[in-house]
Image (cartoon, rainbow, N blue to C red):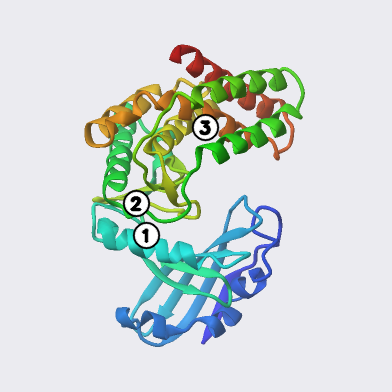
Amino acid sequence: MNGSTTPVPASPTNGSGIRSLPAVLDPIELGKYLDFFSFRPWNWGELRDIQVQALKTGHRNRCVVEILLQTTSTLHPLIGKFYDQDRSDVYRAMERIARAGFGPKAEFSIPEPLAFLPALNLLLMEKVQGVRAKESFVGGNERDRAEAAERCALWLARFHTLAPRSGPILDPNRYLLSLEQWSGRIAELGEPLADKVGRLLERLKAGASMLGPIEMCAGHGSYCHAQIILANGRTVTFDWDRYDVADPSRDVARFIVALGRLGLRYLGSIRALDAAAEVFLKTYLARGCREIERRLPFYKAATCIKIAKYEVPRPPTPERKAIIEAMLDEGLRIMQQRK
């Protein structure tokens, strides 16, 4: 077997904290770990060549690579995701979701999970060819955006309705504790951010007590434009590291607020993608859980804090602080309208 790769130097953006990084990026070493008995159902034949390339990621505890396997049958492009700990649970969760009607031949699907290699904590899955939803929202016209929003909403409504419930349960008290921790990180940046995040957190604490119960469902955990591929005749959602059981309002809110941040970063305004967000919500409510309407402001405002804190570890430029402040202002606006 011959192998080649494009070397990627270890850094905080490509998972340098993962001990198995050198083995995964070395095609010869990787070939030693690949047990092709796992792939027998696909009848891929004998392995002839492996090519590996690291894809950009902002996480130190996981890294994503593209793997090209040349076998006696054909070339097989795969996505590999490897972790600093055992995440075989993600593979099992993906198998359950696929069996529930989200397999590779379904209109609304996930990447086909192929195997988990424990020695490397490496998850292997299908590489889906298509356009990222982000590209449609940033570079498309209003029609493109509306179509992308509708497809994303239909996927989520189907997932919330049909997917099996597995994984950790989103506990409201622990969620509020997380909001406090995230708010503390933002407050460390000083004024006016500290005052704004403090006021928003107090309003969220007051609003949480008025939510009441709702039936939980399968949750994605970070559902947004960045995790969705619009393929030909197929809408595919990936990145299942945070799968859980949660209030459906959380996933809906995450998508809408993330669109606002996307508009702010690439189109100059947090309101730039409001029309697409409206299409998304209307489409979801027509197919999904309508009980979320009165709960959505709370989760949208809470998501503003969560998304704002993503900017905290990055270089403290005026642009980063402006994004954080805009997200906090949006959260305060949402909670004010809720009254």
Residue 83 % position (x, y): 59, 64
Q: Residue at x 26, y 37 (%)?
A: 288
In this view of the protein, which residue sits in the foreground, 15 or 328? 328
Q: CA distance from mark 3 to mark 2?
A: 23 Å
- Disc 3 on helix, strand or loop? helix
Q: CA distance from mark 2 to mark 1?
A: 7 Å
In this view of the protein, which residue sits in the foreground, 110 or 10? 110
Mark 3 — residue? 303
Residue 126 seen in render? no
Sequence-earlier tag: 2 or 1: 1
Q: Residue flagged by tag 2: what amino acid is it?
A: Val
Q: Quick one: label 3, few (<14), some, or many (20+) residues within 10 Å?
A: many
Mark 2 near mark 1, Cβ–Cβ under 8 Å? yes
Q: Residue at x 48, y 18 (%)?
A: 334
Compared with 143, 3 (above or below) is below
In this view of the protein, which residue sits in the foreground, 150 or 48? 150
User: Which image quadrant for residue 304?
Assistant: top right
- Does residue 191 appear left or right of residue 100 in this picture? right
Q: Quick one: label 2, few (<14), some, or many (20+) residues within 10 Å?
A: many
Mark 2 — residue? 236
Residue 191 % position (x, y): 75, 19
Q: Residue flagged by tag 1: what amino acid is it?
A: Pro
Residue 312 seen in render? yes
- Does residue 113 appear left or right of residue 105 in this picture? right
Sequence-earlier tag: 3 or 2: 2
Mark 1 — residue? 111
Q: CA distance from mark 1 to mark 3?
A: 26 Å
Residue 188 % position (x, y): 76, 30
Q: Residue flagged by tag 3: what amino acid is it?
A: Thr
Q: Residue at x 40, y 81 (%)?
A: 38
User: Which image quadrant for residue 145?
Assistant: top left
